[in-house]
Amino acid sequence: IIVAGPNDPELVERAREIAGLEVRGAVEEVELQRLLGGASSLLFLSPYEGFGLPVIEAMAAGVPVVAANRASLPEAVGEAGILVEPSDAGAIADILIELSRDSSRSESLATAGRRRAADFTWERCAEIVLGALKEHA
């Protein structure tokens, strides 16, 4: 398990004691793409996400997403990933194990994720903003 992104120092210290867990911290874009390319899934449990760009990036890369059922993440993930209660460690572990063992489920989520991520382009964003501005002008 690789944990990327800024983390609480206490979490990093505790993670050193867990075999098979590597905390990388912030990574450059090239490294992020390499990590996503080799990932079996993305677990994203942020409770206060403003948009959910990491889940969109993972879905665009064809990585199945398991995300917190919080803030903007349900809207970003839609039906293309699995939403979880962040405090339910047992259920989360079961889902990650299932995804690692069930290649058809993982591929189904990867395909749905790619389609979902295609909805989130800068061009589409600009179209929506311009449409809203025209509507209220």
Image (cartoon, rainbow, N blue to C red):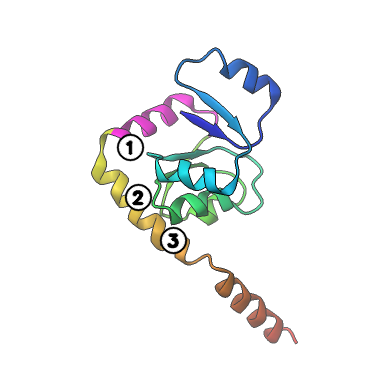
Q: Which residue is mark 2?
A: 109
Quadrant housing residue 136: bottom right
Q: Which residue is mark 1?
A: 99
Q: CA distance from mark 2 to mark 1?
A: 9 Å
- Up-down: is 132 above or below 118? below
Q: Which residue is mark 3?
A: 116
Which amino acid is tagged 2? Leu
**Of the numbered discs in the image, which one, if any, rests on residue 91?**
none
Residue sticking out furthest to the right:
137
Q: Which residues are magenta?
A: 86-100
What x and y, as percent, mark residue 26?
Answer: 63, 38
Numbered disc 1: secondary structure: helix
Q: Quadrant of the C terminus?
A: bottom right
Q: CA distance from mark 2 to mark 3?
A: 10 Å
What x and y, as percent, mark residue 27?
Answer: 60, 40
Question: In screen coordinates, is 58 left or right of 5?
Answer: left
